[in-house]
Amino acid sequence: MPNRLAHASSPYLRQHAENPVDWQEWGDEAWEQARRENKPVFLSVGYSSCHWCHVMASESFEDPEVAAALNRDFVSIKLDREERPDVDDIYMTAVQLATGHGGWPMSVFLTPDQKPFFAGTYFPRHGRQGVPGFLQLVTGLAAGWRDDQEEILGTAEKFTEGLKQVLERSLHAVGDRLDVGLLDQAVQAWHGQWDQENGGFGSRPKFPPHAALQFLIRYAGVRHALAGADALKDELSNQAGSMALHTLDSMALGGIRDHVGGGFHRYATDENWFLPHFEKMLYDNAQLLSAYTQGAAATDDPGLREFFAEVTDQLVGWVTREMTTSEGLFMSALDADTHHEEGLSYTWRYEDWALVAGDPSLMEKYGIELDGNSYDEATGESTGRNIPFLRERVLRDPALDDLLAARLRWPQPGLDDKCLLGWNGLMIGALAEAGYIPEAERAARAWIALSDDLPHQVVKGKHSGSAFLEDYAYFIESLITLHEVTGNGEYLEVSERICDEMVDLFGDPRGGFTFTGRKHEVLIGVQKPCLDNATPSPNGVACRVLRRLGRHQEALIHLSSSLGWAQRFPTGAATLLSEALEHLLDARQASLSSDDAPQITLSLAPASLRFGEDGWAHTTLTLRIPNGYHINGTEASADWLVPTRLTVEGAFAEAAFTDEAQFTGELEVPLRLRQRGETDTFTVAIDYQLCSDSECLLPSRAIIAGSIDHA
């Protein structure tokens, strides 16, 4: 008999409607029952295309004995993480604090007032390798609640206090300033993690590094504009471009790409992008569409440009064919499993491929083997099936269209048909950027029709939930992009109106944006999401839309409040770093185009030197620093700040700087010089960086000349 999930809007929840577990949705009814009956709550969180969610459901939630224990001793709540990312984020943080890692399915046990006392991810039905079986865990926690409830409540209270501090923590930036050195250090950090052979960062599993790729492409293209030419700049630019383009190339060759149907699977379980987990997510493909579009524009290699263009074309073909509703909105995901077997709809038996396209050269080209080329991730045993992949770049063979037509006649993976505003925003913007304007406009207009009260999701024409920060930020950006590529002022007008709402609902006057706003349920804590995850940093994109709408100072205030995260975790902050890059470019352009750009001035007294019998001459260099600015000391307080440096040409020199961290006003620096060669002149150069209380300007140089009296 179906439980209470049978009529849920979420496809993921409906997948569990036939479980013997008496599931409830997150809401007042469930929590009131827990308080009334003094029962702990078992919160199970997942999403429809999650392979291990299906495994745990099959092993445990469909098991009558497990269901009986849960129904007797707990109130059980099933939650779709994509419907309630705010709830998911809080308790995933709890899981990470408790275990050191995260993932789905998420399994959290809570007191009736929503405080966690035990947290984990997937638990097998029967214990193995030191992991307790799920039934053993459930019965043990139920006994603990009966016998030691006060102790559990005390533990939950302490854990929740720590959780709240983590959720609401902020990392203050060193100096709260922008500097090109921070960007350079991030590129160096990525290079230290780069897999030079296979592309990507780190080893397995490998997730497409969407935000990093886009940052690296942009950095490689504009790093030269941020400062004068030097060897380090050239090396970093080359490294950034190589990392991005090689990673894009490797992913497009590998099995993580669906060579027959287009688009990309979620991630690869190996180092070389061959063996994927087969779910297909809208947000992955939206960001990869942008990355390949930008990569094609950035490369000087015509063959690579053509290859990337084909990747984007096939990706869009999949989206329009399989992921678009009749209203033009974009659905969320395709399952990893078909008939409880992962990848069944995407892998090929040798004879099935040969029946449709038996050309031996085509089979060789896509790695199709008689005994299969794929293997089980856990056991390493052959599956007898083939994952198409490429060993070298080739353009799509027309025979793949016949293979796709045959594959579409097979049983298909489950489709999560909910349409999320934020993910749609990512795809709309990517389509517009790539030149697929009709598809982008159709979806955008459907959401604009709902923009008087933006919903988080639309399912089968019904909209629900208040939009979160990421929904606002991603959608606003898509409208700005549409305005830029079409010239249609309506998109700009709507984006400006919605941006005002975003600032009002989520903006913190002290800087930054909270994930939930005034319309949302009050939970344990409220985060300001600054780092990138599977989707780009909501704070980073919020800053970006403010800048793109011309609200530069406002954007800079919010960006500066997040800089501590970028300084501490640079490889997790690509979106914030991308914004820092754009602000630095704007500042550089302004300094180049303005005669009034602030700068220090130099003077020498005396300016004409006569060397004494000991071979030395003495003078004083005076630096006059503009009001409201300072320059860094000779030892900068952070690696990404530029220290003040003095160099002399035409003489040997010693300078007596003080050891202050910053210099302001008028600074006198005694110099002692010894003649070098027969020159009659010498020059003193000061490399410095002007900083105010809110920002740092780009590094600059001031030079003054002196003369040598040989009389």
Image (spheres, grey):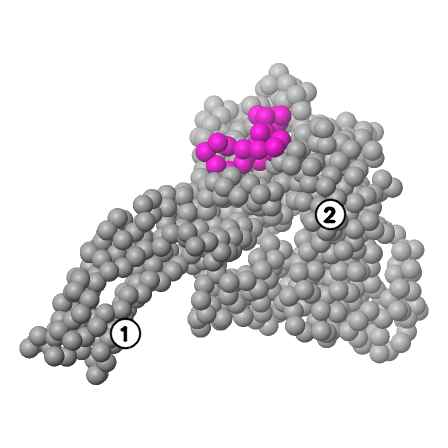
Q: What residue is rendered at 77% in x and 57% in y?
A: 315
Kindly identify the amino acid type of the residue bearing the numbered disc 1: Glu
Task: Examine the image and state in which quarter residue 618 appears.
Answer: bottom left
Q: Residue furthest bottom?
A: 678
* Viewer-nearest residue: 179 or 102: 179
Where residue 598 appears, x then y in whole percent?
38, 52
Type of amino acid at the residue the image marks with label 2: Gly
Instruction: Report the number of discs.
Output: 2
Q: Residues within 10 Å of mark 2 (few under 14, many from 20)?
A: few
Residue at the image point whose x is 41% and y is 52% from the top = 597
Separation of disc 2 and disc 1 at Cα? Answer: 54 Å
Element class at badge 1: strand
Q: Give the image location of residue 623, x and y in percent.
A: 26, 56
The magenta-colored residue range is 500-522
Examine the image and state in which quarter residue 550 appears. top right
Secondary structure type for disc 2: loop
Screen quadrant of the C terminus: bottom left
Q: Is residue 504 part of the magenta span, yes or no? A: yes
Question: Vertically, is 287 above or below 358?
Answer: above
Asked where in the image residue 36 lies, by quadrant, the reply is: top right
Going from the N terminus, do you reach mark 2 or mark 1 first?
2
**Residue plotted at (53% across, 29% down):** 524
- Residue at mark 1: 649
Q: Which residue is mark 2?
A: 487
